[in-house]
Image: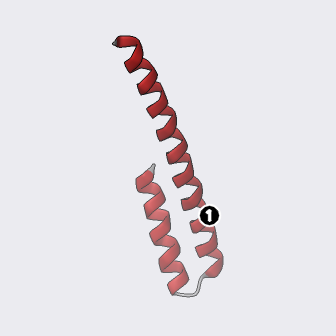
Amino acid sequence: MLKWAFIFLVIALIAALFGFTGIAVAAAGIAKFLFFLFLVICLIFFIIGISIGKKVM
């Protein structure tokens, strides 16, 4: 998911460079959404890992 966020960020930068502001804004919005979704999922897995680790020990 982080890879896709990076890909959309690159698309947004290239589109902004060539003056396609609508496409750049849309791609940047998608990249931002995917990045924050990645952070939330990563945090959830981190909390689950800590809770399972405490039960094992």
Which residue is pictured at 45% across the width and 56% down the height?
4
Q: Residue furthest right?
A: 22
Identify residue for label 1: 29
**Which one is nearer the viewer's eye here, 52 or 28?**
52
Taking 28 as reference, is 47 above or below it? above
**Which one is nearer the viewer's eye here, 23 or 34?**
34
Which residue is pictured at 58% across the width and 75% down the height?
24
**Which one is nearer the viewer's eye here, 57 or 7?**
57
For the image, the number of numbered tags is 1
Q: Residue furthest top?
A: 56
Q: How is the image coloured?
A: secondary structure
Q: Secondary structure at mark 1?
A: helix
In the image, taking residue 14 as reference, residue 26 lies left or right, namely right
Taking 44 as reference, is 51 above or below it? above
**Which one is nearer the viewer's eye here, 37 or 24?**
37
Q: Residue furthest left?
A: 57
Which residue is pictured at 49% across the width and 67% down the height?
9
Q: Mark 1 packing: few (<14 Cα in 10 Å), some, or many (20+)?
A: some
Location of residue 33 in the rendering, given as x and y in whole percent from the top left corner: 59, 55
Q: Quadrant of residue 50?
A: top left
Location of residue 38 in the rendering, given as x and y in whole percent from the top left corner: 50, 46
Location of residue 57 in the rendering, given as x and y in whole percent from the top left corner: 33, 13
In the image, taking residue 49 as reference, residue 32 lies left or right, namely right
In the image, taking residue 36 as reference, residue 14 lies left or right, namely left
